[in-house]
Image (spheres, rainbow, N blue to C red):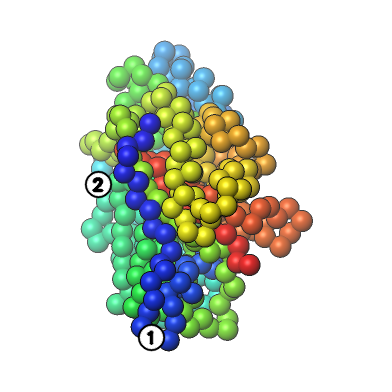
């Protein structure tokens, strides 16, 4: 069940006293990308990693391997090749080592995703006004936002925002944040272009997670879910577009964030001496799926362009970019919303072929839907974005193809 307060950001309808009405301005997605490291981590690789240091017949590890076999994930991707010393070093990496590994592998991964999205947009780097970055697998100061701006050669007065603590909801939260920032720029009559980047290197914590499983004698589903990846989008508020810029893929019509009641202990990402350890209880799929129908209804009800037509309250009239936190989560969400596998086709595909890459996963799903546009496989004109993170926090947005 959700708490009563839901924060939404409907499009502005106030008038600007200059030459145009704010209602003419909407934030659009004008570039998308996803990028994964080159090293495949297949389902059977987990047993090999466990066997290198531990007895695979340990009861808690046996349960973890059983969860892994039923995950329905074919491949995950990691920054470490299977012969990397990371997997064989008898000393566990501590939090300082994890920080160094993220800077070594994560920053270039995020940079590549950003460059792909910028190329997809085809605008000028000098026109980027905002950078919104999210990661839950690093807490360095200065952060990933600074590192990206330096490596990309962005202007030194670009407005930077770095999100943390949002977990798997981070990609959708970053999208909402960038949307709000560009609407604010439009309110002031200023052009706005935002680069949004999500990057996670979850594999740097796998070794310490195994130790924790043995110590606590409790299986951890996270061992069977998480991989490494990055995603990026470019947003525009449409003011003074340049001829080279890509035409909008979708307009963002609204976004929302909602805290679910009595769920704070269900989904966590707790820091320890050797990094972050995910906590995902068996209640999460049920809690998230039961929150989606009312969250969807509230989102549409608070969207001025949609709330007057009852047809718009039908979940099946949209494609869904749902963060695939786990197979049961997606399956229960599908049932709760009364939609088909086709509505969630890209969520299923990304989950099966890439696994869960935390905050970047939902951006990867958006990217897959963008790649469909203009092809015979192209789906519905409107998309609901939805993701869940610690709290439990539900992030949602609605996007529509321009008329």
Tell me where residue 368 appears, x and y as whole percent.
61, 53
Secondary structure under the numbered disc 2 in the rendered image: helix
Tell me where residue 260 appears, x and y as whole percent.
35, 36
| 385 up-or-down from 147: above or below | above
**Closer to the eye: label 2 or 1:** 1
- Closer-to-camera residue (86/134): 134
Q: Quadrant of the C terminus?
A: bottom right
Task: Name the residue at 43% across, 19% down.
Answer: 61
Q: Earlier in the sequence, mark 2 or mark 1?
A: 1
Circle 1 residue = 18
CA separation in Å, label 2 and label 1: 52 Å
Please say whether residue 212 is visible from this viewpoint.
Answer: yes
Task: Name the residue at 54% across, 68% down.
Answer: 30
- Closer-to-camera residue (270/234): 234
Please say whether residue 49 is visible from this viewpoint.
Answer: no
Which residue ends up furthest to the bottom in the rendered image? 19
Task: Name the residue at 31% across, 44% down.
Answer: 5
Disc marking residue 354: none
Circle 2 residue = 96
Quarter of the image for residue 58 reads top left
Which residue ends up furthest to the right in the rendered image? 376
Taking the image as shown, residue 225 lies to the left or right of residue 190, namely right
């Amino acid at each position: 069940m959700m708490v009563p307060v839901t924060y939404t950001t409907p499009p502005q309808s106030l008038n600007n006293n200059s030459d145009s009405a704010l209602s003419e301005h909407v934030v659009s997605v004008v570039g998308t990308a996803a990028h994964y490291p080159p090293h495949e981590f297949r389902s059977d690789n987990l047993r090999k990693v466990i066997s290198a240091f531990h007895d695979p017949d340990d009861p808690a590890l046996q349960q973890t391997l059983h969860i892994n076999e039923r995950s329905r994930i074919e491949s995950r991707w990691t920054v470490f090749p299977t012969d990397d010393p990371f997997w064989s070093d008898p000393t566990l990496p501590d939090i300082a080592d994890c920080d160094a590994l993220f800077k070594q592998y994560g920053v270039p991964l995020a940079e590549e995703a950003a460059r792909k999205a910028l190329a997809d947009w085809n605008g000028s780097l000098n026109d980027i006004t905002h950078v919104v970055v999210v990661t839950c697998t690093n807490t360095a100061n200065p952060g990933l936002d600074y590192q990206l701006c330096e490596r990309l050669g962005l202007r030194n007065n670009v407005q930077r925002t770095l999100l943390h603590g949002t977990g798997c909801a981070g990609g959708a939260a970053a999208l909402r944040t960038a949307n709000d920032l560009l609407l604010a720029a439009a309110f002031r009559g200023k052009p706005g272009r935002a680069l949004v980047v999500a990057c996670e290197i979850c594999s740097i914590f796998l070794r310490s997670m195994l130790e924790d499983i043995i110590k606590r004698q409790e299986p951890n589903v996270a061992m069977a879910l998480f991989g490494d990846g990055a995603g990026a989008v470019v947003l525009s508020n449409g003011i003074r577009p340049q001829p080279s810029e890509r035409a909008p893929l979708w307009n963002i019509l609204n976004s929302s964030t909602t805290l679910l009641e009595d769920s704070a202990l269900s989904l966590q990402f707790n820091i320890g001496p050797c990094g972050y350890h995910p906590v995902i209880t068996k209640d999460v799929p049920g809690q998230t799926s039961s929150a989606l129908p009312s969250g969807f209804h509230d989102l549409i009800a608070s969207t001025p362009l949609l709330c007057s037509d009852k047809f718009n309250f039908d979940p099946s009239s949209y494609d869904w970019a749902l963060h695939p936190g786990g197979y049961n989560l997606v399956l229960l969400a599908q049932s709760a919303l009364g939609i088909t596998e086709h509505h969630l086709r890209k969520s299923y595909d990304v989950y099966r072929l890439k696994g869960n890459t935390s905050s970047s996963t939902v951006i990867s799903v958006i990217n897959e839907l963008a790649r469909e546009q203009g092809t015979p496989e192209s789906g519905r004109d409107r998309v609901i974005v939805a993701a869940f993170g610690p709290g439990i926090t539900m992030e949602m947005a609605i996007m529509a193809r321009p008329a």
